[in-house]
Amino acid sequence: MAVMTVLDAINKTLFEQMEKDETVVTFGEDVGFEGGVFRVTKGLQQKFGKDRSFDTPLAESAIIGGAIGMAVNGLKPIPEIQFSGFVLPAFNQIVAHAARYRNRSRGVYTLPMVIRMPYGGGIRALEHHSESIEAMFASVPGLKVVIPSTPYDAKGLLTAAIQDPDPVIFMEPKRIYRAFKQEVPETEYKVPIGKAKVVQKGEDITVVAWGALVREVEKAMKLLENDNISVELIDLRTIQPYDKETIINSVQKTGRFLVVHEAVKSFGPGAEMISTVNEKAFLYLEAPPTRLTGHDVTVPLPKGEHHFMITPERIAREIKKVVNF
Amino acid sequence: MLSKKFDPLKGKILEVLNYKGEIVDEKLVPKLDDDKLIEMYKTMLLGRIADIKALQYQRQGRMLTYAPIKGQEAAQVGVVAALEQQDWMVPAFREMAGMLYRGASLKQLYLYWYGNEEGSRFEKDVRILPISVPIASQINHGAGVAYASKILDKKEVVVAYVGDGGTSHGEFHEGVNFAAVLDLPLIVIIQNNQWAISTPRETQTKAKTLAQKAVGYGIPGIQVDGNDPLAMYIATEEAKKRALKGEGPTIIEALTYRLGPHTTSDDPTIYRDQKEVDYWEERDPLKRFKIYLINKGLWSEEQEEKETKEVTDYVNKTFKEVEATGLIDLEETFKYTYAEMTPDLQEQLDDYKAYLKEVE
Ligand SMILES: Cc1ncc(C[n+]2csc(CCOP(=O)(O)OP(=O)(O)O)c2C)c(N)n1
């Protein structure tokens, strides 16, 4: 075991998988020589050479469109999009092509590829650097969307993503890239895509979160220590396909449901999950299933960002509201 | 035509003032009156000092991420100095000196890098569009503004900026091609500062110059010494004349250099060596313009000293004003989503206000 941050864990996984499988290639803006602006791909070019880890021209559509061609022809591409906000020029390639190749070719061509990108707010960044756009991808059939919240999961989920036969959008909560460390096995293991994790068992309310917000919910639970509320916290880990079973089982036990996400409210992942809870666990509910989310506004620049962020205090208050409904 | 004489395919570069501050070709010197020359220089100096200060403030934790302009002042001021009030400036994000010359206030520009949207509020008569962070997308906006200029028969031209890295983007191609096909009054300034974060220009394109990309679009392209404000001025002037005659867009590649980091989160020592930086330090646009003005009797070291002090005070004072603005109001983050706040948004705002009251 070694102690790693989320960032180390992703870096280590890329090393491990590139070592193991010669077809794995990593590329993107500043990915090769510099090792990415966050240094996630640091050392890969030095170790595996420029053919397998390289800098691309500044062109997202080429990065993803190119990755599609590579996957068709025997490589396992892991393109990096520098910030999730800059994936939009490649959205056409992802939605119109990556997601559809299997279906379009009736299974003749499949696209084993992982599109990595840092996402999320709370780092006082410029415009287009903070949005949580997992719902945009999750609503496209053919894509899988994965978001780790711990170093252990980052490694296990990324390994699973790389070995998955379909395109996986791997979103990295950059706020916690370096926030904390954890013991992580140095040998290969997988955390299955599509399986949520019950972080803490509880009786009164089910709270679902992912990415950086799992940590915020944990902080909220500390704030509630004297309130005699027993929270069951679920880290969703995969947004699409998401683990309905774990959620439903939990809600059937607790009778209450809160989903917390940083993405904007309307047409977000929370709406989807609440709908599922209503369908599958309606008779168990003791309070309306609820979401705590970003406001439906453009994420403000840093001097206003605090108005947008989901804080432990807000989470704690919302939990109390649902429990005391 | 300059772009014929200085054919980028033949390796020609337009230069008027060499790096020692000497005129290379008298015939090319633009007829600028003394006041204008001094104004150009003063703006470059203001840009330089504001830039150095911004970096300092950022290091002190008082300013947010900032993209330095040091070394690129001439590539910006030389261009906008050739524009008229009614012309448009469509920036990328590293054009502070050019924006200052066009009439954006330092306070506003600082406010933007301080993390406040009000820094993007350029009143319409300033004719500057807000900074575009997604690379190269603004070239298409420039083409659109130029289309409107053309069909509404406004006598105005549009200058859109992009970096060397930005020329790799689909949006660059699409925008320039669109403008070329429709003969739009668009001037595309490529600020080739040699690096796109850690990626050198050679990794962006196989072409020897960025200016020669114009050939493929069927429009003129010219490579200019971007650290020479006079060369940038005459190249822009010519492009403007063509644009106003309905002859369409021009690509001007400003050969320049980013002396500082890409942004305050970047460490350029990882990817470039000091020798390269030293080479370009010698070619500093301010140095050569100063020598030129001193030789013309328009400037002196005493004036430089006095101006530097005044500008430094002004910059400090301005930054204090910016700092005093602090955080922005909650309403501000909601207000500009739609012309009228939707009922749902109003409800979200009210709920959140109620929450704030409760925890007060
Ligand atoms: C579409 C898009 N992709 C990636 C980025 C991240 N990014 C910001 S600046 C930059 C490099 C830009 O280089 P260049 O166009 O040469 O301009 P310079 O920064 O050198 O002025 C990158 C990759 C972005 N802003 N937009």
Image (spheres, coloured by chain):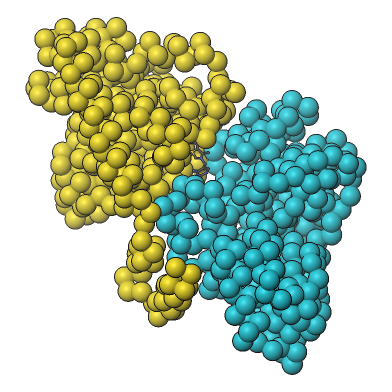
Chain colours: A cyan, B yellow
Q: Position of residue B176 (x, y in %)?
A: 39, 42
Side of B115 where B303 appears, left or right: left
Q: Quadrant of the N terminus of chain B?
A: top left
When asked about the image quadrant of residue A195, the answer is: bottom right
Side of B72 where B241 appears, left or right: left
Q: In this rendering, does residue A71 appear at all?
A: no
When asked about the image quadrant of residue B85, the answer is: top left
Side of A7 where B313 appears, left or right: left
Q: Quadrant of the C terminus of chain B?
A: bottom left
Residue at 63%, 81% (x, y): give it.
A322
Of residues A226 and A192, the one drawn nearer to the viewer in this rendering:
A226
Depicted B185 relative to depicted A275: above or below: above
Q: In this rendering, does residue A57 appear at all?
A: yes
Residue at 76%, 81% (x, y): give it.
A254
Q: Position of residue A33 (x, y in %)?
A: 65, 28
Depicted B127 relative to depicted B79: above or below: below
When asked about the image quadrant of residue B67, the answer is: top left
Q: How many marks?
A: 0
Residue at 38%, 10% (x, y): give it.
B282
Side of A122 where B23 appears, left or right: left
Q: Position of residue B65 (x, y in %)?
A: 46, 40
